[in-house]
Amino acid sequence: MKRKIIYLGALLMMVLAPSCSKQVEIEEEISIKDAAVKGELLVKFSPEVAQILEANAVLTKAGIPAVDEILQIAGAYEFERVFPVDTRHEARTREAGLHLWYIVRFDADNDIEEVGRKLSALGEVSGVEPNHTIKRAYNPEKRAIPFDVAATRASSGAAFNDPMLPFQWNMVNDGKLWNRGFLAGADSNVEDAWKTCTGDPSVIVAVVDEGVFYDHPDLAANMWHNEGETFASSEDNDGNGYAGDYYGYNFVKETGQISYSLAADTGHGTHVSGVIAAHNNNGVGISSIAGGNASVPGVKIMSCQIFSGNYVASILAEVRAVKYAADNGAVILQCSWGYTSSAANQYDWAPQYGTDDEWMTDCPIEKDALLYFIHTAGSPNGPIEGGIGVFAAGNESAAAAGYPGAYGDFVSVIGTAPDFTPAVYTNYGKGADICAPGGDQDYFYDHDKDGELGTIGCILSTVPYHISESGYAYMEGSSMATPHVSAALALAVSYAAQHHRHLTADEYKQALRESATPIDDYMIGPKYYYKYVADLGQNQRKKMELDSFKGKMGAGQLNVSALLRKIDSAGVPMQFPNVMVSPGKTITYDASRYFDANGSATASVSDTSIATVSVDGSKVTFSGVKEGVTDATVSMGGASRKVKVTVKKSNSQNWL
Amino acid sequence: MKKILFAIFGAALLLCSCHKEVEPPVEPQLPVTFTNTAGEWRLVEWRGQTDVPTAYIRLKDKEFVLWQTAGSMYPTKVTGSYNLVEEEGVGMIIRGMYDFTYEYWEHMYLITSLTASKMEWTSMDDPTDISVYERTPDFPE
């Protein structure tokens, strides 16, 4: 059985397939799940036929006789690339082989298995995968807990003037909130970090989730805008393959109109966004880890919508969203979803992938898209080279994180309570990397008084108004822990950008782990909590033995301040890069990113028969004239750097 | 006078013989094979220019490592696989493909003038695009 879950903790679950779904093996090449879109297959062609496809493929045909014969019998009516052409990034799309993935739509009455089997048997086809559906299911009794504005209180000495900050133990935990046994310091340790950096608008976090409430008063200032696009336009004005993608894109409905307020929307995407980049120190609502400071902008939120109300989303939407994020500048991929843990108990769950091989074999297009993100996001000439995918460990109380987060190249996040103990619901152990506050409603259930049901120990953040009239509500889950880590990494990249340092994505991940606060000392004795047992119709007191979590909580608890200190000594200083440009093309660098100075730059080239240079403020633009190598000198603020300018035909930035 | 002439001839003969002694030995040409091209090489000339961006390539067991500085602020290293194919009447052609990609190198190259210490690569689609590589013990790890 195959299910995919978005982790909403107490709120909801989103499943790829109903629990009763079955996997049917078709030879060895393809596995079809019940939860697949009928009449659709994702087909990866062999590199050898790529040119034939591009030359001959039309709306309903591949242009390859053997393939077309099968498609014709299947009643194919649509045949198109999974990843639309974005001329700015087509070269690297090809380098990653993503141009070889096509979606075939055919008569829904035809058997997907049969069509898939026939296609996968062809030498021209290297892989066939059904278009899995992502189906939402949730317990309507479990809702986000609206925040009552009347409950806000003045705070003295707080880092920011946001009135709800005193309720955000996940940011600053003084141990006194609600007087319910919280442990001072069991938070994200972000307060000291805010003194040196609160975010940088050049850093983009892609929230791959429900749509983000982009007009929320606490989020609007930090929403990403695609300046080349018109909001919700039906035209693809910037030629990136997507029309009207101003705040991001709705990959479910294939429109630039992001949705967040359908009756079945839970506010999940808006909630995780608030943890990352709600506007700090604006006298409104909550504080966030990387949301700037008053007039200083924070990191930007890009809404990559893959869930929408009760509409069925699919793996197609997910992989397009991931690639879109990389191609449009995001360097952190915030993913509070994943597959069920392989260690989940089989009574309540349908355990899934337990090894990298299992996941990669069954989800090849998801693997391709996610690896594309981590390999191609960022820049070798910027503060981060590569991208970082951050995933929820999952909520099955299992001793193994769910995939994709468990894959070694990604970061998988465990949820903790306000005393460093593992949240009752959280997955942990194998494949999990780090802990962060996720809330723990069941842990504090017995403290329910005065209408505070469910709020104690949960995470307060932004939500759409149909979830809470105040625009703020409490949720819990490893879903809620995950954005703390995404935000911390975004803050670290911001800090590096502002201090002219360059790190690889792997170096950021290493710094994240090395800066974490060890919490094994808190894994002692029993932890009691309350769980509603439907069969009995009542809450029962339960116990978990904390000793069994010792050594299984990843690197420990997220420590944002320590992470920023690590950046000071990690990586290398930024310096103006050597230049490689094709004849007839231009490439522009912002010198202010490399020199510790403001103002205008100057630049000169030794041999203008090979390349020329022009300067506009801090922007330095090189133009390739003919193939060859010449020297250039770029200066700013009294500092200079001599670089080599290579003019060479190249689709990539590689020498060969 | 004779003594002077003898001295001049003697010096000339001596100079000639000395000049001959400092001429580098001519390295024998080697057939272009996987074995003879295997090893670590440094780019020393491109399009007749010797002031080129630093680039190294390691060829071993049909896999390559390319260490390069062009286009970045710090060296970058990329890996992939390559093959040598004989094209009748032309010679041995090298073609590579990057890892994590299905993309070939920008060009295929004809390998000529291979010796124990040097080789020339000429782009198959641009005969003026000639790179000279020298064997190096200093491949950056």
Image (cartoon, coloured by chain):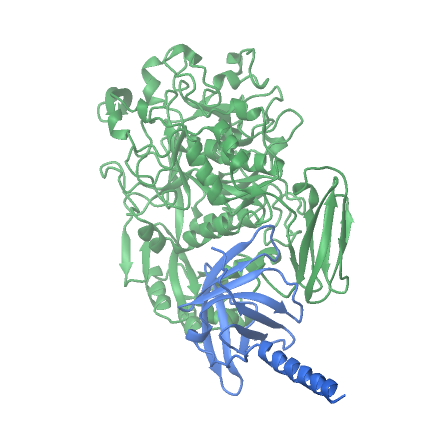
- Tell me which residue sits at (32%, 29%) in the image: A425
Determine which quarter of the picture holds residue A279.
top right
Relative to B3, is A221 on the left or the right? left
Residue A42: horizontal and vertical position, in percent? 42, 59
Determine which quarter of the picture holds residue A446.
top left
Q: In this view, does A235 lie above or below A196?
A: below
Residue A461: horizontal and vertical position, in percent? 50, 25
Q: In this view, does B49 lie above or below A455?
A: below
Relative to A372, is A530 on the left or the right? left
Q: Chain A is which colour?
A: green
Q: In this view, does A125 lie above or below A395?
A: below
Relative to A288, is B45 on the left or the right? right
Whether residue A468 is visible:
no
Q: Is residue A90 above or below residue A5?
A: below
- Tell me which residue sits at (57%, 59%) in the image: A90
- Tell me which residue sits at (74%, 39%) in the image: A637
Relative to the observer, which residue lies in front, A152 or A550? A550
Residue A192: horizontal and vertical position, in percent? 53, 23
Q: The blue chain is which one?
A: B
Relative to the observer, which residue lies in front, A503 or A129? A503
Determine which quarter of the picture holds residue A364.
bottom left
Residue A594: horizontal and vertical position, in percent? 66, 43
